[in-house]
Amino acid sequence: MGIEMVSTDKRAAAAQDGRAVEPAPAGTTAKRQIPSFLVIGVLSTLFYLGLYVVARMVVNPQAANLIALAVSAVANTAANRRFTFGITGSEGALRHQLQGAVAFVIGLGLSSGVLALLDHVAPHASKVVEVGGLIVANGLATVVRFLLMKVWVFKD
């Protein structure tokens, strides 16, 4: 039972129709994917931080982080699936979300670690300091997320 990924890529469409396919010039895919990934990453980070700040008004930092990261990770994976990697349709979407959950767990580990470290070294740190730490952790998680998506989740 193979899961077929549907692509908007013209080369993939040509291959499916039996037409000759010329390989993409080296680096073209990455040159297209990285800007898209960065835009989605910035928007996802802003969404995540907004959710975190709102959730932080009613729950502790770790719970706010979990809530904000879980919601934004699903949206991030869906957006990258469509816009960065050009995969449309619902086929494979659940599998991609489950694979994206690995990146979520890594991001959760990094951000939770930053919050735990802050709680240990500066127990009365302001929310601004918390958010600053989360931005750093999110940056590291973003690099890992792109690599996982590129080589495993949405591999060419």
Image (cartoon, rainbow, N blue to C red):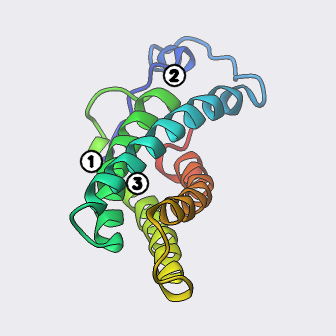
What amino acid does circle 2 point to?
A: Ala
Residue carrying label 2:
12
Q: Could you say where residue 90 lies in the image, as x and y percent from the top left?
A: 25, 33
Q: Residue at x 56, y 59 (%)?
A: 132
Q: CA distance from mark 2 to mark 1?
A: 22 Å
Observer-nearest residue: 80 or 114? 114
Q: In this rendering, is residue 83 above or below 146?
A: above
Q: Earlier in the sequence, mark 3 or mark 1?
A: 1
Residue carrying label 3:
100
Observer-nearest residue: 50 or 48? 50
Residue carrying label 1:
94
Q: Could you say where residue 137 lies in the image, as x and y percent from the top left?
A: 56, 63
Q: Could you say where residue 40 lies in the image, as x and y percent from the top left?
A: 49, 35
Q: Residue at x 27, y 47 (%)?
A: 94
- Mark 3 neighbour density, 10 Å: few (under 14) some (14–19) many (20 or more): many
Q: CA distance from mark 2 to mark 3?
A: 23 Å
What amino acid does circle 1 point to?
A: Leu
Q: Could you say where residue 29 lies in the image, as x and y percent from the top left?
A: 66, 29
Which quarter of the figure is the C terminus placed in? top right
| Disc 3 to disc 1: CB gap under 8 Å | no
Q: Nearer the viewer, mark 2 or mark 3?
A: 3
Observer-nearest residue: 124 or 38? 124
Using residue 25 as the reference point, say whether residue 80 is left or right of it: left
Q: Earlier in the sequence, mark 2 or mark 1?
A: 2
Q: In this rendering, is residue 105 above or below 31?
A: below
